[in-house]
Amino acid sequence: MKRYGYHRTSTREQHLDRGIKEITIYCEQNNLELEKIFTDQQTGKNFNRPRYQVLKTD
């Protein structure tokens, strides 16, 4: 089974690094192989975010 991570921030001032690190650590601690992490720096008002759409089709 492929496992993907997804992390979104609302503004450019927020950093993606922390969320990516948390996803990676969680997978390592639970012996889960992580295929890929998708990220967006966009509002969460709707699901029309570029990388989220790619995640759904991958």
Image (cartoon, grey):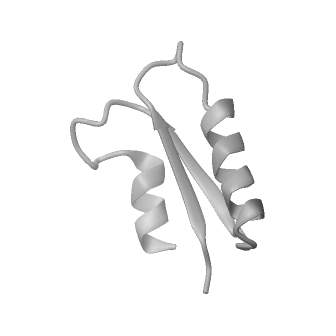
Percent position (x, y) of residue 2?
62, 80
In the image, farthest residue toward the top: 13
**As drawn, 16 above or below 14:** below
Rendering quarter of residue 52: bottom left
User: Residue 17's image quarter?
Assistant: top right
Q: Which residue, as the protein is rendered here, is positioned at the far front? A: 29
Q: Is residue 14 left or right of residue 42?
A: right
Residue 50 percent location from the top left of the image = 42, 48
Q: What residue is shown at x 60% (from left), y 38% (from top)?
A: 19
Q: Quadrant of the N terminus?
A: bottom right
46 sits to left or right of 29: left
> Which residue sits at x=52%, y=44%?
7
- Residue drawn at x 39%, y 31% is 42
Q: Residue furthest bottom?
A: 1
- Vertical relation: 30 (above or below) 14: below
Residue visible at 44% across and 19% down in the picture: 11
**Horizontal side, residue 38 vs residue 27: left or right:** left
How many numbered discs? 0
Q: Is residue 36 above or below residue 9?
A: below
Task: Say which of 45 and 27 sits in front.
Answer: 27
**Is 55 drawn above or below residue 15 in the view shown?**
below
Q: Position of residue 37 (x, y in %)?
A: 63, 55
Pick the front one: 36 or 32: 32
Quarter assignment of residue 57 = bottom left
Q: Nearer the viewer, residue 24 or 44?
A: 24
